[in-house]
Image: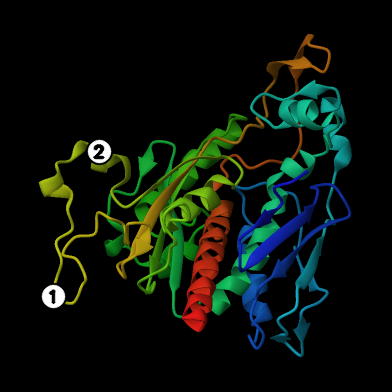
């Protein structure tokens, strides 16, 4: 299986399955001399971990990170950073009923057809549990990019949207509720909707907005490695993501050029920011903002018609521990992937300057 590594300069290779002994990764390209805040890394893991509130999966995993290499006396050495996160609360028997069937909208069918074998326990490698590895790497990338502010938050659940621009939100309130929405009125409505959906044995989707501030001018490598293209790839690699837009996004397609153009100020900043902080695939110093759409979780606590491995029609029973809405736990994952993209371009700029 290829495709398990992300990045070109600051790279993450992840490994492991949802119900294996552990998941983990190797981070390569992290510069030497970075003093790590391990408590901050673990805080990021707590934001993503299961069982943290009444509106997420009740699988209990502490997600403690054990570092194996690349760090000496709390400081990075410049060599590969290896780490593992043990799986301690697997209930593999919860999945024995799907051993020979394909669940609707899961990776069961495609993995089986591509590889001729699949780990049916929690989805194996296709499980969102793999994203814990990304959060570890992203937490280190955030510390490397200490001047850049990365804030993601839930901006919608189902048909409930925040009706304010991000500039009017207080990001310090994002962690004050289980939905991770900085608008308190919207957060209460979202939480009630998720609880109702869960009671019905159903699931619901939503969106996460991410804002990157204090990004230096010049990150991005046209033409095929544009900054927004790499952000899009990073976000679309996250489980359950169905869409990505930055700046004006799809709304920009409805506008005239005279409405959409960002007029310059004398210092190079712009009066508006419909470009979303990126022009020509390169950061321009303005806020970078984008939105990521997540589908409803495919596993329902309801019976669904499907097929087995021989093509016979069967019923897939709804069992196990699953999120009724994935977006609250996906907030730190979105931030982590954004940090990995920025770290790659930030380091690449440093390398290019050394070569000039």
- Which label's residue is closer to the chain start, 1 or 2? 2
Q: Is residue 104 above or below residue 76?
A: above
Q: Is residue 220 left or right of residue 275?
A: right
Image colouring: rainbow
- Give neighbour class at mark 2: few <14, some 14-19, many 20+ (Cα, 10 Å): few
Asked where in the image residue 156 lies, by quadrant, the reply is: top left
Q: Which residue is mark 2?
A: 253
Residue name at image x 60 percent, y 66 percent: 138
Q: Is residue 240 above or below residue 337?
A: above
Q: Is residue 324 above or below residue 4?
A: above
Asked where in the image residue 52 lies, by quadrant, the reply is: bottom right
- Could one spot residue 45 in this view of the protein? no
Query: Which one is closest to the eye, mark 1 or mark 2?
Result: 1
Expressed as whole percent of the image width and height from the top left, the position of residue 300 reads 65, 29
Residue name at image x 55 percent, y 73 percent: 142
Expressed as whole percent of the image width and height from the top left, the position of residue 136 reads 67, 66
Q: Disc 1 versus disc 2: distance between alpha carbons?
A: 28 Å
Expressed as whole percent of the image width and height from the top left, the position of residue 51 reads 69, 54
Residue name at image x 65 percent, y 76 percent: 30
Q: Which residue is mark 1?
A: 266
Expressed as whole percent of the image width and height from the top left, the position of residue 335 reads 52, 61
As drawn, which residue projects farthest toward the left?
258
| Marks 1,2: beta carbons within 8 A | no
- Could one spot residue 111 in this view of the protein? yes
């Amino acid at each position: 299986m290829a495709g398990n590594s992300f990045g070109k300069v600051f790279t993450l290779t992840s490994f492991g399955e949802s119900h294996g002994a552990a998941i983990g990764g190797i981070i390569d390209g992290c510069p030497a001399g970075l003093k790590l805040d391990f408590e901050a890394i673990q805080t990021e893991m707590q934001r993503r971990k299961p069982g943290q509130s009444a509106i997420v999966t009740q699988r209990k995993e502490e997600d403690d990170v054990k570092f194996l290499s690349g760090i000496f006396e709390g400081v990075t050495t410049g060599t590969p950073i290896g780490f593992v996160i043990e799986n301690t609360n697997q209930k593999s028997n919860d999945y024995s009923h799907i051993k020979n069937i394909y669940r609707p909208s899961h990776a069961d069918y495609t993995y089986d057809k591509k590889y001729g074998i699949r780990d049916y326990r929690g989805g194996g490698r296709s499980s969102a549990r793999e994203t814990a590895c990304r959060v570890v790497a992203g937490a280190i990338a955030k510390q490397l990019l200490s001047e850049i502010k990365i804030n993601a938050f839930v901006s919608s659940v189902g048909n409930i949207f925040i009706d304010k621009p991000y500039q009017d939100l207080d990001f310090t309130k994002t962690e004050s509720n289980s939905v991770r929405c900085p608008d308190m009125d919207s957060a209460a409505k979202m939480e009630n909707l998720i609880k109702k959906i869960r009671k019905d044995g159903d699931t619901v989707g939503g969106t996460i907005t991410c804002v990157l501030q204090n990004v230096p001018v010049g990150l991005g490598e046209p033409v095929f490695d544009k900054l927004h293209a790499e952000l899009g790839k990073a976000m679309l690699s996250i489980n359950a993501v169905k869409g990505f837009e930055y700046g004006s996004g799809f709304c920009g397609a409805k506008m005239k050029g005279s409405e959409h153009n960002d007029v310059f100020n004398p210092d190079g900043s712009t009066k508006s920011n419909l470009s979303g902080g990126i022009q020509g695939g390169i950061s321009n110093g303005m806020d970078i903002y984008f939105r990521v759409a997540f589908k409803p979780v495919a596993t329902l606590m309801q019976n669904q018609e499907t097929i087995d491995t021989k093509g016979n029609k069967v019923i897939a029973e709804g069992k196990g521990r699953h999120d009724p809405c994935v977006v609250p736990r996906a907030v730190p994952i979105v931030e982590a992937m954004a940090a990995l993209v920025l770290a790659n371009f930030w380091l690449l700029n440093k390398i290019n300057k050394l070569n000039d």
